[in-house]
Image (cartoon, rainbow, N blue to C red):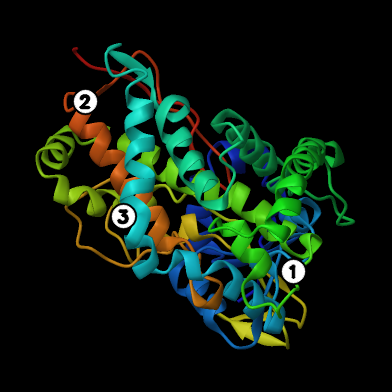
Amino acid sequence: MTATVSWLDDITMTELERNPYPVYERLRSEAPLAYVPVLGSYVASTAEICREIATRGDFEAIITKAGGRTFGHPAVIGVNGEIHKDLRSMVDPALQPQEVDRWIDDLVRPIARRYLETFEDEGSAELVAQYCEPVSVRALGDLLGLQSVSSDKLREWFHKLSRSFTNAGVDENGEFTNPDGFREGDEAKAEIRAIVDPLIDNWIENPDDSAISHWLHDGMPEGQTRERDYIYPTLFVYLLGAMQEPGHAMASTLVGLFTRPDQMEQVVDEPGLIPRAISEGMRWTSPIWSATARISTADVEVAGVALPAGSVVLMSYGSANHDHSVYEAPSDYDLSRPPLPHLAFGAGNHACAGIYFANHVCRIGLEELFDSIPNLERDTAGDVEFWGWGFRGPTSLHTTWEV
């Protein structure tokens, strides 16, 4: 099998951002592992190939070119060996299930209720901006120790970092086609550092129970802390991926349920079904759609395609979660489908560290929403638009209900 198909030359970043599904459906059918010129890398589009590359020993994590330009080094999603081991030992403890269970309800439920109180008596709301994203960023922001940063500012940061990270288009020479597309990300990073640097100064001298304080101190010799330049790239990862994922998963789950009114009614009546509804929402529209990559450490063959050493492969988990060989009618949201593993959180030793945390933020957010507004309906005056190729979610979700 060849990894080069002529129509791949015509793929544009615009169509990937607006609606990647037709392109990736064709990729899965005709070229499930193929070099896509506009991305400057190979693309894995089926569940089997994504999982194989994510777990094979002759591939290592690498950050995408646009991701490296956005986050810098060493970002936890793009390093290996001892650095990866240290960064995961830094971020993982606070996200272990037994730890999360200790405080997740007390953290997230008051946040959700606080936002609901601002609109539950109004009879209408745009839930992405007024609820899903704010609950998501506030929960993680408070966990990190960023209580002094407004939810609006945290949302602004992750949107700017997202547009920078997904500014991935390259020309035939491998140069970015839109170098100005990183300006917003650079502005966000400068603002983040200006706000967080004084907090780090304080945490160095006065450690507390915030996550960033633990990142600085945990596992370090007495009297020493990790350098701030060492933890900032991973903090930028969190302020993008971890900030947006629960909120966009919540919003996508709601959009999916609105397509199945009978299933929406079932979930509202039986809150125990909410985790299953979220899992199907994350499969249906994966918040982290195609943002992780691997590099081959030797000449290898995968799915009949010869990959020279040093080949970069983007794993399109959002495409893998629509693989017809795994899921029946994958473009439909369907709570009743048999529960099958999905790849919304990745696979292998670089799978998302926040799986448990993100799922419970979504669960609590939807529990509170349905408890307060059980008669929630989508405002059908307009369609719901989704955006994003690297990260994907609804841009808005207008809803109404009788007060």
Q: Position of residue 267 (x, y in %)?
A: 16, 42
Q: Position of residue 370 (x, y in %)?
A: 21, 33
Q: Position of residue 121 (x, y in %)?
A: 27, 13
| Quadrant in the picture for residue 222 | bottom right
* Residue drawn at point x = 21 percent, y = 49 percent: 335
Eyeballing the image, is 309 above or below 10?
Answer: below
Question: In terms of sequence position, does the residue under pointer 1 or pointer 2 come before the other?
Answer: 1
* Residue drawn at point x = 9 percent, y = 38 percent: 269
Q: Position of residue 93 (x, y in %)?
A: 49, 70
Question: In terms of sequence position, does the residue under pointer 3 or pointer 2 come before the other?
Answer: 3
Mark sitting on residue 109 = none
Closer to us: 274 or 142:
142
* Residue drawn at point x = 21 percent, y = 27 percent: 372
Q: What whole-number distance in Å separates the C-alpha atoms at marks 1 and 2?
A: 45 Å
Mark sitting on residue 226 = 1
Q: Is residue 401 visible?
A: yes
Marks 3 and 2: which is nearer the front? 2
Q: What whole-number distance in Å separates the C-alpha atoms at marks 3 and 2?
A: 22 Å
Please name the amino acid that badge 3 sits on.
Ser
The residue that mark 3 highlights is 279
The residue that mark 2 highlights is 373
Q: What whole-number distance in Å separates the C-alpha atoms at marks 1 and 3?
A: 36 Å
Closer to us: 218 or 306:
218
Eyeballing the image, is 268 above or below 173?
Answer: above
| Quadrant in the picture for residue 131 | top left
Q: Is residue 20 left or right of residue 128?
A: right
Q: Is residue 336 left or right of residue 17?
A: left
Q: Is residue 191 left or right of residue 175?
A: left
Please rate how many residues cluster around mark 3, counting C-alpha atoms within 10 Å: few if below 14, some from 14 to 19, many from 20.
many
Please rate how many residues cluster around mark 2, counting C-alpha atoms within 10 Å: few if below 14, some from 14 to 19, many from 20.
some
* Residue drawn at point x = 76 percent, y = 53 percent: 201
Closer to us: 90 or 166:
90
